[in-house]
Amino acid sequence: MTVSPASTSMPSPMSSTTASNTVSTTVPFASFNNNTEQFHSAVRAQLAQDIEMLFAYAELPSPLLDACRYVMTGQGKLVRPLLVASAFDSVNQSNANDDVNTADEYVNKSTDKEAKQIQQNSNLESLLENDSDYDMARRAALAVELLHTYSLVHDDLPCMDDDELRRGQPTAHIVFAESTALLAGDVLQTLAFEVLTAELPTFALYDSAIASQLIAIFAPRARRMVSGQMLDLNAEASTGISQDDLEAIHRDKTGALIEAAMLMGGICAGATAPQRIALQDCAQHIGLAFQVQDDILDVTTSTDTLGKPAGSDEKLDKSTYVKLMGVEQATRYAQSLFNDGRAAIIRELSSRELSGKKDSADTNALLALIEWLWSRKK
Ligand code: GRG
């Protein structure tokens, strides 16, 4: 069901609705179109705009608003919103391709005008249908970044890692009072859930059926992220941690939110059960690969490039993949995990593979994002 909010106090310049307010022409994430840089820039621009609209709506008192804006507008890579947008686009493209193939089969069997018309309508309908879900994907992208940023703010607090640098700038509790930083994390977490409710007047469309699925995916994974942090803190005190133990920590601490991002993007695009399984399979591999990479970058990259203190894992005596297996083996492990993640997408979601056009240079948004993640330097 698609409903519109009673009022739209700050409509996005990139959105518009018809007089009945039931059809949106919002195009938050430009289509991937085989151009990774352009696609990522479009996602980042949309997210920046949505963050500002959210803060205008939330009316947070000073200095809470300043602290929230400070942490949400830093130099984050925005991996999780990019995962939402890429999963959304990949599922949309894959399903549009399926529609074209079904119509193709029908047209091939019949040469009359009517069959050709059916094919054109099928392409158009799949685009229009997916249009109405864009706003939900925007909400999902915003939700995952809000939750992720809250975790970083709390993770940096003196009672946790006590870090002074994050995303290339002083951490929230250094710039603001510790109490303000704590509250900023708290309110970012509540906002992450609030953006998935109907009340928020900053998005044109709300689909309650999709929203309830999003919350069912998001809430347990947000909880698992905190459990993972507890397991990580517990591990600090223990010696001789095994790879299985480390994996159990990061499946929750890092992996759960990455899984949520990909599944939420897919759900907004109407992913089928096999597509959801493929997204989850990919996310579990990518999530782990991302953490292994994070451990490697901590010992191989400068503080300047990282935007956070290099070598902090060793300083805090953290259990890491580098400590467990060394940089070389950890790099090979990360690569094999990325390859397994890629394989899940190729199996179920790559239109190039599914359409049989294997000689085409086209890829899809998720495969492109995996390449981008593999080559990341921070
Ligand atoms: C609830 C306090 C609390 C913590 C939850 C997620 C988490 C546990 C803590 C955050 C710190 C951390 C090192 C998490 C591991 C996941 C990870 C590699 C985070 C960094 O993510 P990036 O690289 O960061 O995407 P940017 O700054 O680019 O967004």
Image: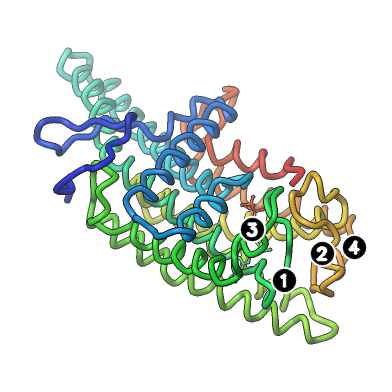
Residue named by callout 2: 312
Of labels 2 and 1, earlier in sequence is: 1
Residue 122 or residue 228, whichever sits in front = 228
Residue named by callout 3: 175
Of labels 4 and 3, earlier in sequence is: 3
**Judging from the image, what secondary structure is the residue with disc 4 in?**
helix
Label 2 close to label 1 by CB (< 8 Å): yes
Numbered marks: total: 4
- Nearer to us: label 4 or label 3: 3
Q: For the residues marked 4 and 1, what is the alpha-carbon distance in whole angstroms?
A: 23 Å
Residue named by callout 4: 326
Residue named by callout 1: 161
- Residue plotted at (74% across, 56% down): 294
Label 1 close to label 3 by CB (< 8 Å): no
**Judging from the image, what secondary structure is the residue with disc 3 in?**
helix
Asked whether mark 4 and ligand 1 are closer than 8 Å, the reply comes as no
Q: Position of residue 11 (x, y in %)?
A: 27, 37
- Nearer to us: label 1 or label 3: 3
Of labels 1 and 3, earlier in sequence is: 1
